[in-house]
Amino acid sequence: MIPPSFVQDLLSRIDIVEVVGRHVQLRKGGANLMGLCPFHGEKSPSFSVSPSKQFYYCFGCGASGNAIGFLCAHLGMGFVEAVEDLAQQAGMTVPQDERTPADRQQADAQQARQSSLSDVLRRAADHYRRELKSSTVAIDYLKSRGLTGEIAARFGLGFAPPGWRSLASIFPSYDDPLLEESGMVIVQAGDTTDESDRKRYDRFRDRIMFPIRSVRGEVIGFGGRVLGQGEPKYLNSPETPIFSKGRELYGLHEARTAMRQRGYALVVEGYMDVVALAQSGFANAVATLGTACTAEHVSKLLRFTDSVVFSFDGDAAGRRAAGRALEAALPHATDTRSIRFLFLPTEHDPDSYVRELGAEAFQRCIESATPLSKQLLEVAKEGCDLGSAEGRAKFVAMARPLWTALPDGSLQRQLLREIASIGGLEAAELAELWRGQTAPRGASRAPVSRDSAVARPAAAQAPRTRAPSPGRLASRRPPSSPADQAIRMLMLHSDWWEQLPADDHDLLHAMPAPHGEVIAWLERQIAEHGPMSWAELEQAQAAADPPLPEVATVPRAALEDELSFSDLRRVLDGLRIEQLRERQNELIGRISSDAAARSQWQELDLRRKALLKALASPEAG
């Protein structure tokens, strides 16, 4: 706990005009300084900063406070973080009486290390911006996407040239360990321990560069988009001491003020969506960094606004992403907050939608976005035949974990009545039923539905009828079907999941039960924890409640198998061939009388034969 006396001493040494002036342009207005309020949209200055009182006040929206309060409100900092930031500026040490000298020394070393990494990334960002100015190819690409130089400068866009060691021109020592630790340089391990013999090269080459900034504006990582064709289309910085995909949002630093002005945060899926939407007037957009939306993402956004709109593509992948966002948002859905879900047509993302149909049409989509309460009910209804007692019972069972994740309040109680009504029960009956179902102790997240990918909160699960032993999975029969084989490979090499393109993800999710259910569970584990070893997955699978279907067999003897990504590719191509054959069989009865069906059948046949030919080639083995 920081002593109040220290806080008062700190505020007496800090000039609020200097603190606020870094973020708001201030001009003299009598005894005080005036500027445009950063907390609401205005054209005439009503934001006043008093040097004598060391206090700010907005006559328009009523925002007020001291220097610490300004950093908390404007940058989304916590109280301790704001105090530490100001103390560093003032050359003061925040008292941490509970820490040992060794702990304090370790914390100081960590802060110095993070500062060094930030400096490396800042210098790289400056280099990429300079390179963009001299690259006609990169400039032409950005212009083709409708971006202006002004918007590119606002987001600090740059260009990584195609050379292998471009960064060597700006860092005097290319073998500096900080370049590898910051994720800017890849060091290829060799057979020798001699550092001079290890191959080093830039991680980002021939890509449009999107600097990822912290809320305070420091560069903490990069996203790079390939020019033209190539894989991966987007490449992100790896996890580093100052960058974690599960905590950061692209564009948050640039979007803070617009969130307050427009009254909501707009969460999209891509860097280019954020930049293009800002160009079209939606400067309140942010994006997750190639990962599922997390509870920490939602919590961070709610520091700046009480309203969040998630925008997703209307395809299967978008629906799954929406499911994960719903789960992340449920614990934060208090009675005073608004969380909504927007699904665009399958052929559009936000960028293409705005460019083709205009900003006004996109604004209408936002205004008609689905409220969280309705999205919760729709997810619970998936796969339920509400015309039968069994279907209604299944709906009630699916709704319970989602409802339980909501905080206590009016919204939760209203939804109880709606769930009861859809399920053919009285609200009092449903409340009594759920009160009689106790949650398991120490349960982890349960499996998710194949389409929604919404995990059931642990506190909401029914008691288990049996406790699988940790070795239960290892004793199952060896895999035989291609679906079994695909799951087995992904269980042994979960890092391969992120190497697969979206259409392969869709193929795996579309597998019939029980395989599709296991794939949804596996994707959830990877999204939350990153690639996991087989031992970690086995432990998580054994703790799943209710237990996962008996697939994904990995005998102990198989753990030493030498599998390659091409083996998985062959299995997936086999599954794709079978999927194409099934779709052809569905069309076979119509091809003699329906020209469209005949054309579709022929297209599917060409794709199937091409895959068969590829599988038969020597290179495929």
Image (cartoon, helix red, strand yellow):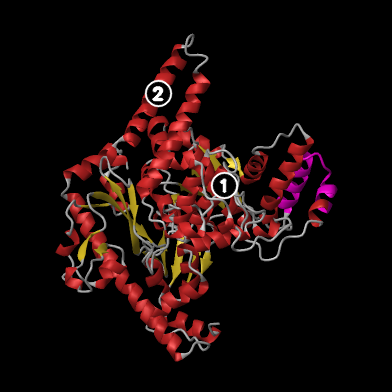
Q: Residue furthest bottom?
A: 101
Percent coordinates x, y for residue 202 in the rendering? 23, 59
**Dot 1: what SS?**
loop
**What is the chief secondary structure element of the magenta stretch?**
helix
Q: Residue at x 77, y 33 (%)?
A: 388
Q: Residue at x 73, y 37 (%)?
A: 391
Is 562 located above or below residue 8 in the figure? above
Query: Quadrant location of residue 306?
Result: bottom right
Q: Is residue 462 visible?
A: yes
**Which three-letter amino acid code belongs to the residue tagged 2?**
Asp
Does label 1 or label 2 sit earlier along the sequence?
A: 1
Is residue 278 found inside the magenta-colored segment of the image?
no
Label total for image = 2
Percent coordinates x, y for residue 16 in the rendering? 42, 73
- Residue carrying label 2: 605
Percent coordinates x, y for residue 467 in the rendering? 68, 61
Left or right: 309, with 531 as reference point? right
- Pointer 2 local density, CA inside 10 Å: few below 14, some 14–19, many at least 20: some
Label ID, residue 348: none
Left or right: 24, with 55 as reference point? left
